[in-house]
Amino acid sequence: MHSSNRALPPLATLLPFESAARWESFTRAAQELNLTQAAISRQVRALETDLGVALFERRNRAVHLTPAGRELADTIASGLGKIAEHACALRGSNNPLRVTLFCQLCEAFYWLMPRLADFHRRHPDIDLKLTTSTRPLTEQHEPFDVALQTQGRPCGSHRLAFTGSDSIFPVCSPNHPAASATPIPLKRLVEHDLLHYRPASPDWIEWPQWLQAVGAPDVAPRLGRHFDSYPLLIQAAVAGHGIALGWRRSTERLIASGSLVRPVAERLDQPEALEIYTPPNAFDRYASRALLGWLRETLESE
C-alpha cells in the first residue's frame, strides 16, 4: 500500500463532509447527495474519529464548522475542484469546438454581451459557454478555458495571456444639474451628490483615489449614496440620482445613446485594466485559440 493511502482519511467520508460543510447543514447535504441525514452524520462522525478532532459544533439542532473543520473544508473543496476541472478538461479535450469563458459579471453585462454576436458570426461552429461571477477567478470552482477579470483581483496560478486598457471618469444623467454646462471644473464636481460603489474586493478605485490620480488631491468628495452593485450604481446615475465613477468599456454605449454624459473632462487611464487568463496546464484547442484571438482583437481595436 502506498504511504499516502495510509495518511488519507476514509475517502467515502469526504463528499458528505464537503457538502455538509458547504451548507453547514446535514439536512441540506443529505438532500444534495440523495442520502439520509443519519448517513451524513455517521460519515462526518467517522471522519472526526479518524482525524481525532471535532469538525462541527452541534447545538440546538444546528451544526457550525469549527476552525479545524473550516480549514479542512477549504482544502477538500480546492482538491475536488481541481479534480473536477481536470476531469472536465479531459472529457472536452477531444472536442476542439467547445470553449468556456469565465467573465466578471460587470464586464459580461456591459461590455461582452453586446459584442458576442460578432464572435458567433465569425465562429458559428464554436460552442461557447459563458459563466459569470462577482468573485475572483480563484474562487471559481467550475472549469473554464479562458477568464476575463479586472486588474488586481486574485489570479492564483492561472497564466496571464494578455491585458486590455480601460479608463475611469465621472458620469451622470444629461438631466443632472452638473450636466448643464459641461465640462465643469473638478472643484465644482464635489458640489453635487456623488454615488459610491463599495465592493468586497479591494481593487476598486473610489472617489478620493480618482481625484488624487487626476491631480486634485485637495478636493474632498461629499458623502453620498452607497451601492454594493456596479450595475445599480450606473442605473442610479442614469436615473439622475447623482454622479458615479464609470469605466469606459461599461458606459460607452450609454454615453453614445445619450443616457449618460461626462460632466468633467478629466479621466484616469488604466493601460492594463482588464486581464485575460488561461488555466495552468490548459489544453491548446482550436476553440480556445479562437476566443483568445477574438478577445485580443476586440480589446485592442476599441
Image: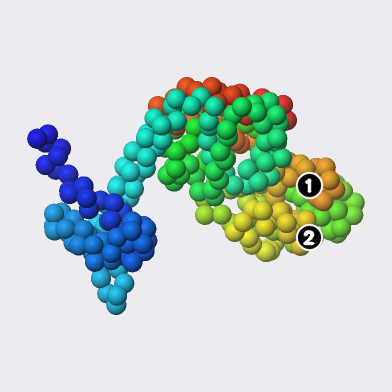
Residue sitting at x 64%, y 36%: 270
Which residue in the structure is indicated by mark 2?
Answer: 239
For disc 2, the neighbor class at 10 Å (few under 14, some 14 to 19, many from 20) is some
Asked if the residue at tag 1 contacts the one at tag 2, i.e. Cβ–Cβ closer than 8 Å, the answer is no
Which residue is nearer to you in this view: 110 or 300?
Answer: 110
Residue 154 can be seen in this image: no
Looking at the image, tell me whether mark 2 or mark 1 is earlier in sequence order.
Answer: 2
Percent across and percent down for residue 206 are: 63, 51
Provide residue 297's location: percent of width, then percent of height: 66, 25
Q: Determine the residue positioned at 65% across, 28% down.
A: 124
Name the residue tied to disc 1: 254
Residue 221 relative to residue 132: left or right:
right
Residue located 90% across and 51% down the image = 181
Give the residue type that dot 1 points to.
Answer: Leu
Question: What amino acid is found at the position of numbered circle 2 in the picture?
Answer: Ala
Residue 42, relative to residue 165: is it above or below? below
Q: Secondary structure at mark 1?
A: helix
